[in-house]
C-alpha cells in the first residue's frame, strides 16, 4: 500500500456519511483520549443512524470504565476480527496510525479491501490505512472529533461532551502540558457548554486510585535514577516490583510523569518488564522541552508525540535499557 492519502475534514465527514456500517478501533493500552474519542464517535455515528461498533484491545481500565456505560466497548476477539472487518463498509482507527500500536490487527486492517480511515493527532504515520485525517498541532484526538461534529452539524450531547472532555483533559495532563494551547481551552469551553462537568471528571480520573496504585507511585518516586546532571530520569518496573505492591500492569499508566516533578528533569524514560520472558519490554518516553522523543522512539520501532512517545523493544529489561539510555543521554547532551 502507498502512504495514506491525507483528507481534510470535509472529505472525512463525507466518507463517514457514505458508510452505513462502520467498525471503530484504537490503539492498544487505550488511554483517556483513545477511549473518550472512540466512544464519542461511536455514539455520534449511532445517533446518525449508522450501524456502528467499536472494539478495544484489552478490557477498559477502571478509571475509564464510566466512558463505556452509555456505549459498551467490547474487546477484540482476534479469531473473529477478519469477519468483523469484512462485514463493514468503513474501518475507522481513532488516535493512532501506528502499526505497532494496533498489534495483531495491523495486518488484517492493512490488507483488507474495505475502505479505511485513521483520525489522529500523532506525528507517527504507517501505511496501515488508505486515508487519514491528521492534525498534529492539536493536543488531543478529541479536538478533531469535536471539530468534525461542529462542521458536520452533529449534535454534541452531555454524554458525548463528557467523553470528549476526558480525552482532551487526559492528553493535556489536565491542561498542564505544552500542548494545552488556546485551541485546547476553546475546545474545553465548547464541551463545558455542551454539558461536560470538569470537577466530576477530575474526581473520577485523578482522585479515585486504589491503594496498590498509590503504593506503586511511591515505589517509583523512591527508586528512579538520575543521569546527565539530573536532566534524565530513568524508571525500571520489574515483575517483582509490580507484584510486591499488589498492583497490576494496568496501574502503570502515567507513572512516567511522576519524576518530572523534579525541576532539573527534562526527559524521562520508563522500562516495564514483560509478564513473561521472550515478550517485548514496554518503553515510554516523556520530555518537557528540547528533546523530540517521538523521533527517539521511532529509532526503536515506536512513535508518538514530540513530548510523549513509546515503543516495544525485544530483549531483557536491562539489555533494552542499555540500548535506550545512551540515546537519551546523547540527545540531552546535544541540547
Image: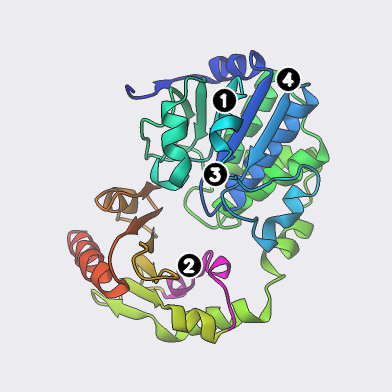
Say how the picture is coloured.
rainbow
Disc 2 to disc 1: CB gap under 8 Å: no
Whole-percent x and y of residue 77?
A: 60, 45
Q: Residues within 10 Å of mark 4 (few under 14, many from 20)?
A: few
Which is nearer the eye, 310 or 138? 310
Task: Assign a secondary structure to mark 3.
Answer: loop
Which is nearer the eye, 258 or 322? 322
Residue at 75% x, 34% y is 43
Q: Quadrant of the C terminus?
A: bottom left
Q: Which residue is mark 1?
A: 86
Return the disc, 4 or 2, that comes first in the chain's sequence.
4
Return the disc, 1 or 3, that comes first in the chain's sequence.
3
Whole-percent x and y of residue 86?
A: 57, 25
Residue at 64% x, 56% y is 59
Q: In 3D space, how far apart are the residues under numbered discs 1 and 3 (Cα atoms)? A: 13 Å
**Which stretch did the figure color magenta?**
246-262
Specify whether 266 is left or right of 157: left
Circle on res. 78:
3
Q: In 3D space, how far apart are the residues under numbered discs 4 and 2 (Cα atoms)? A: 37 Å
Return the disc, 3 or 2, that comes first in the chain's sequence.
3
Return the disc, 2 or 1, that comes first in the chain's sequence.
1
The answer to whether one can see residue 221 in this image is no
Amino acid at each position: 500500500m502507498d502512504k495514506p492519502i491525507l483528507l481534510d475534514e470535509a472529505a472525512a465527514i463525507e466518507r463517514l456519511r457514505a458508510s452505513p456500517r462502520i467498525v471503530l478501533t484504537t490503539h492498544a493500552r487505550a488511554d483517556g483520549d483513545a477511549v473518550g474519542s472512540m466512544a464519542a464517535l461511536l455514539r455520534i455515528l449511532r445517533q446518525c443512524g449508522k450501524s456502528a461498533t467499536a472494539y478495544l484491545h484489552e478490557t477498559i481500565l477502571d478509571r475509564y470504565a464510566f466512558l463505556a456505560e452509555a456505549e459498551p466497548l467490547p474487546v477484540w476477539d482476534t479469531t473473529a476480527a477478519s469477519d468483523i472487518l469484512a462485514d463493514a463498509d468503513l474501518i475507522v482507527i481513532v488516535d493512532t496510525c501506528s502499526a505497532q500500536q494496533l498489534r495483531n490487527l495491523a495486518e488484517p486492517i492493512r490488507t483488507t479491501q474495505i475502505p479505511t480511515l485513521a483520525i489522529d493527532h500523532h506525528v507517527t504515520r504507517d501505511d496501515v490505512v488508505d486515508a487519514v485525517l491528521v492534525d498534529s498541532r492539536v493536543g488531543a484526538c478529541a479536538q478533531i472529533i469535536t471539530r468534525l461534529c461542529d462542521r458536520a452539524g452533529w449534535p454534541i450531547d452531555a454524554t458525548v461532551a463528557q467523553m470528549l472532555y476526558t480525552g482532551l483533559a487526559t492528553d493535556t495532563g489536565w491542561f498542564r502540558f505544552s500542548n494545552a494551547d488556546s485551541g485546547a481551552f476553546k475546545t474545553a469551553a465548547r464541551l463545558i457548554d455542551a454539558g461536560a462537568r470538569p470537577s466530576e471528571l477530575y474526581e473520577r480520573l485523578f482522585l479515585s486510585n486504589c491503594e496498590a496504585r498509590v503504593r506503586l507511585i511511591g515505589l517509583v518516586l523512591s527508586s528512579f535514577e538520575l543521569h546527565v546532571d539530573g536532566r534524565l530520569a530513568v524508571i525500571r518496573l520489574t515483575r517483582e516490583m509490580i507484584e510486591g505492591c499488589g498492583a497490576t500492569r494496568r496501574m502503570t499508566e502515567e507513572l512516567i510523569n511522576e519524576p518530572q516533578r523534579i525541576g532539573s528533569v527534562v526527559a524521562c524514560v520508563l522500562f516495564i518488564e514483560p509478564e513473561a520472558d521472550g515478550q517485548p519490554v514496554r518503553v515510554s518516553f516523556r520530555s518537557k522541552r528540547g528533546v523530540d522523543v517521538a523521533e527517539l522512539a521511532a529509532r526503536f520501532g515506536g512513535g508518538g508525540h514530540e513530548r510523549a512517545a513509546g515503543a516495544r523493544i525485544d530483549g531483557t529489561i536491562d539489555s533494552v535499557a542499555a540500548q535506550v539510555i545512551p540515546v537519551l543521554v546523547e540527545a540531552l547532551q546535544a541540547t
